[in-house]
Image (cartoon, grey):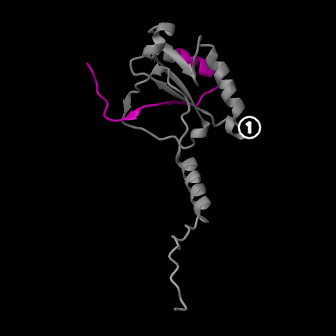
Amino acid sequence: MSKFKKNSTKGLPAINTASLPDIVFMLLFFFMVVTRIKDAELKVKVSVPKATEVVKLEDKSLVSFVFVGVPTEKLQEVYGTSPRIQLNDAISKSIEEVILFIEAERAKLTEENKAKMIISLKADKEVKMGIITDVKQELRSANALKLNYSTHQGQIEYND
């Protein structure tokens, strides 16, 4: 008969998976670089005002946020409807906690960056200036003199 027989039991060749770990690590690295971690859960409503002259902050690692606004609907049962101050993930019980917050944020920074620390005040546009002034006085007491007001870029509307 024939010297060469056709092997009919032969199946499909195996898939080469040697590069699969490389692909998985590239995807992992990509998502680690691109994903942004949420800093704080907002417990107060903040609708920042509009401004025409807006400058973007360069180094976000030096920025600490102070939120001022009315508590969200689910927290209004506990905190009421008056404007509150949120420091990190907690609503402060008193204005004096601002100094403790500043000291804790400074402790996280290196010595050369402590002088560069910026406080970004994100206040609702409907909040009265009294609570903003109180926060600013506490920031002065804590020697946090670099203050930034967070806004959205847009045309300012004047209501007479």
Q: Is residue 107 left or right of residue 67?
A: right
Most extreme residue toward the front is 1
Magenta stretch: give its range: 134-160
4 in relation to 63, above or below: below
Q: Looking at the picture, which amino acid does disc 1 mark?
A: Glu
Residue 66, by quadrant, is top right
Residue 151 falls within the magenta-colored stretch: yes
Q: Which residue is mark 1?
A: 111
Residue 58: tell me if it is visible. yes
- Seen at 56% across and 68% down, the residue is 14
User: Residue at position x 55%, y 18% from top?
Assistant: 135
In the image, residue 128 sits, relative to residue 61, either above or below, namely: above
Q: Residues within 10 Å of mark 1 (few under 14, many from 20)?
A: few
* Residue drawn at the location 39% of the way across and 34% of the way down: 152
* Rendering coords of residue 143 (x, y %): 65, 25
Nearer-the-camera pick, 1 or 8: 1
Q: Is residue 113 left or right of residue 26?
A: right
In this view, the residue farthest toward the left is 160
SS state under label 1? helix
Per the image, is 143 magenta? yes
- In the rendered image, residue 29, in percent from the top left (x then y), is placed at 59, 53
- Residue 126 x/y as whole percent: 39, 18
Q: Residue at x 42, y 31 (%)?
A: 151
Instruction: Give percent across and percent down for residue 131.
Output: 50, 14
